[in-house]
Amino acid sequence: MRCCCAIPRRPRWSNFGDWTENADGQQTTVKGLSITGIGAQHAVILPTIPRIGNVGVLVTAAGEPTLFHPGDTYEHAPSDVDVLALPLSAPWAKSSETVDFIHRVSPRTLFPIHDCTTSPAGHGSYSGSSRRSRWRRRRPAARPD
């Protein structure tokens, strides 16, 4: 059985040049951007499913807003985040944990990711609970024919 997220032998991103593996606390600089690994493990989905590696990233540059992509966990909430890429719908997340995570990170702006299973009405329930942050909605991705 193949999983829809299985990585092919030659990853489709392999044509983008050299890649550097990241880890919790490891800092890499790419063309003026500082990329720091945050965390090490995916959130628990079920106790019977082994946890896998998962490293979020904090992206900073002098004089620019700070972006945080937590990966698939709400465990870490760095300070001074301007823009949060918020995983909105996942088998490991509860709505109350999502709202709590928004409050712990307290970004100026956030945008939802990991949200294909969330309806427009569902988006509203989160944005109404995060008044301190400016909520940015993405346009739905075009569905393949």
Image (cartoon, rainbow, N blue to C red):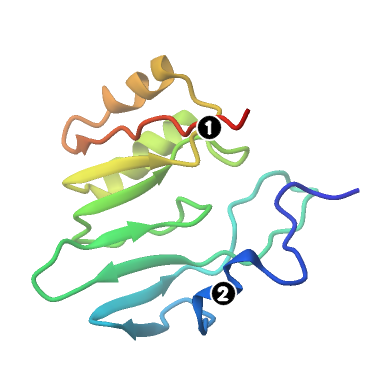
Residue, far left: 63
Other-residue count near label 2 (Cα within 10 Å), few / some / many at <14 / 14–19 / ≥20: few
Other-residue count near label 1 (Cα within 10 Å), few / some / many at <14 / 14–19 / ≥20: few
Amino acid type of disc 1? Cys
Residue 71: percent from left, percent from top: 49, 57
Quadrant (top left/top right/bottom left/bottom right) for the C terminus: top right
Residue 143: percent from left, percent from top: 55, 29
Question: Which of 105/19 is in front?
Answer: 19
Residue at the spot 16% in from the left edge and 46% down from the top edge: 108
- Using residue 134 as the reference point, say whether residue 47 is left or right of it: right
Residue 42 lies in quadrant: bottom right
Residue, far front: 145
- Using residue 139 as the reference point, say whether residue 1 is left or right of it: right
Name the secondary structure under disc 1: loop
Separation (CA) of disc 2 from disc 1: 27 Å
Where 21 sits versus 90, above or below?
below
Name the secondary structure under disc 2: helix
Where 79 sits versus 5, above or below?
below
Question: Which of 2/65 is in front?
Answer: 2
Residue at the spot 49% in from the left edge and 31% down from the top edge: 142
Residue occupied by mark 1: 116
Residue 24: percent from left, percent from top: 47, 76
Residue 64: percent from left, percent from top: 13, 66
Question: Which of 63/92 is in front?
Answer: 63
Amino acid type of disc 2? Asn
Residue at the spot 29% in from the left edge and 48% down from the top edge: 104
Where 119 sits versus 111, above or below?
above
Where 61 sits versus 4, above or below?
below
The mark nearer the N terminus, 2 or 1, is: 2
Question: Which of 96/30 is in front?
Answer: 30
Q: Nearer the viewer, mark 2 or mark 1?
A: 2
Residue 15, disc: 2
